Amino acid sequence: MWVARALLIAGLLGAAPAGAQTYDQFRALCFGEATDDQSIVGCNVVIAAGQERPHVIAAAYLSRGLAYKNKGDPARTSADVSEAIKLQPLFPEALAARAALHADKGDTERALQDYDLAIRQRPGFADAIHNRGTVHALRRDYDRAIADYDRAIDLAPQDPYPYASRGNAWFNSGNIERALQDYARALELQPGHIPALFNRGRVQASRGRPDLAISDFSRALDVRPDFDLFMNRAAAFIQRADHDGAIADYYRAIQLRPNAAAAFSARARAYRWKGDLERALADHGRAIELQPSSSDPLVERAATWRAKGNFDAAFEDFGRAIRLQPNDAVAYLQRGTLYDSLRKYDAALKDYDRVLALNGNDPEGLARRCLTRAKSGKLDGALADCNASLRQRPDDAATLETRAYVHLRLRLYATAIADYDAAFARAAPTAAGLYGRGIARRTMGDVTGGNADIAAATAQRETIADDMQRIGVGPSL
C-alpha cells in the first residue's frame, strides 16, 4: 500500500535557500534519486538545519520516514510520518502514508479515514484511491474496492497495479473470468508485473490448472527470486504430483528465508508423499525447533510417524501438540483418525467430540465421527452426523461414500447405491466404495453389476474383502 518516496515528494518543493553547496547536495539526497541510507542522511541535514519553510520540513520528515519503511523500521517510519502531519495536517501524501501504516496494523477503520481525508485534499490522488480500494478489499467490501480501482484506472490507465488489484477483487467476489481479464491487461501493460503473475497463478491453481499456475509463477521468478513465489510454485508442483519439483522449490524458498518453519513443514510433507520419510522427519524436526511453542509442526510430524508405522511416536507428538495448544482442533481430528485406523473407536469418538465442541458443526469432524460411529455400530448417530456434514458440503464425495456405507449397514440398499453413485460422480471410485456398492447391487439382485464392482475393488486392493468384513460389510450382510 506504499508508493515510491520520490513520487510522494514531487512537486512540493521550491528552490533551496541560499547556502553552502554541501547543503544543496544533502537536500538533493533527501528529495531526489538516492538510496534509502543516502536519503536518511540528506533529510537529517535538512531537518536539523531549520532553513526551510514548514511544508518542506514536513516533506523531509515524510521522505525520511519512507526510507525507514523501505529499510524495515516501522517505528521510525511512524514517528516521521506523524511529525510530517503535525507540521502540515492536510498533507495528502503524509496522510496516505499514515493510512498505510494503519492498514499494516489491521486498523482498517482509521486507514479509511486517512485515505478519505487525503483524497479530499487531492481528488486525483490515484495511488491513494487505489490503496483505499485495497483496504475495502481487506474488509471484504468488494463493491467499494472495485469502484476505487475503477477510478484509479481512469486516472492512471497505464498503471498495471489497479488492474491487478481489481483482478483480486473480482476473484474474491466470485467472478473468475473478469479477474483473469484484469490480470491479462496488467500484463499487457507490464509483461513482468509480479502481482498480476502471482495472483493469476494462484487463481489457476485454485481452478485445478497447475501447469498454467507454474507458468505464471515461473515468469514472475524470472523477474526476481521471491519466497512466496517459490512456495506457491511448489504447491502447484504438488498438485500435479511432481514431488521432486516441489522439493527443489522448497529448497530455494529456504535459501531465501532459512528460518521459515512453514517451508520446512511443507518440504517435509513433500518428502512424506514421495516416501522419503527420514528426510521428512529431519525437516519436521527443524520446523519444531523454529516454532517450539506451536502445535502445527508436531501435528505434521505425527502424520509422518504414522506413515512410518511408529504409532507410539505419533501419539506422543499429538499429546505434545495438545498440551501446547489445548484447543487445537486439527490435532484432535488427526489423532482421532489414527485411533479409528487402529480400531480404538471409543478413543476416536472422544477426540471427534472434542473437535465438535471446539468448532461447532465442523463438517470434517462430523464426517469422521459418522464413519467411526458406523464402524462401531452406532448407526443412527452416524447417519445424523453424515447428514449434518452433507448439509454444509453436499458435494463432498468422501462423505457421500461414508453415508452410503451407513445405509448399507442399515440394509437400505437402494439408498446406499444412490449415495455410492453420487460419490463416484464427484470423485474416482475407491476400493471400499466399489466393494460396498457391489454388495448392495448383489443383494438387490443385480449380480452381474455387483460382481463387476467387487472385481474392480479387488483389482485396486487385494485385501478389500477382508478389510470390509472387519467393518461389517460382506457377502452375508
Image (cartoon, helix red, strand yellow):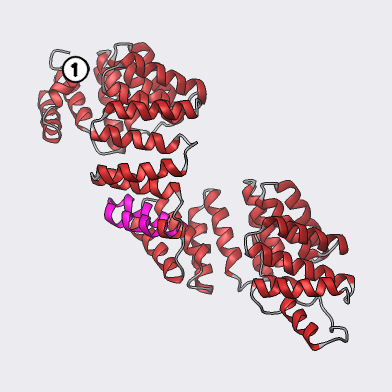
**Dominant SS in magenta:** helix
Q: Position of residue 457 (x, y in %)?
A: 15, 31
**Residue receiving disc 1:** 470
Q: Nearer the viewer, residue 116 or 81?
A: 81
Tell me the amino acid under the disc marked 1.
Arg
Q: Nearer the viewer, residue 292 or 157?
A: 292
Instruction: Name the residue located 51 percent from the left edge and 63 percent from the top edge.
Output: 196
Q: Position of residue 379 (x, y in %)?
A: 33, 12
Q: Specify the quadrant of the image occupied by residue 476.
A: top left
Q: Nearer the viewer, residue 434 or 343?
A: 343
Q: Specify the quadrant of the image occupied by residue 79.
A: bottom right
Q: Position of residue 228 (x, y in %)?
A: 46, 56
Q: Position of residue 293 (x, y in %)?
A: 50, 36
Q: Which residues are magenta?
A: 228-253
Q: Is residue 233 magenta?
A: yes
- In the image, taking residue 328 as reference, residue 343 lies left or right, namely left
- In the image, taking residue 453 as reference, residue 36 lies left or right, namely right
Q: Secondary structure at mark 1?
A: helix
> Which part of the image, by quadrant, shows the C terminus?
top left
> Which part of the image, by quadrant, shows the N terminus?
bottom right
Whether residue 370 appears in this view of the structure is yes
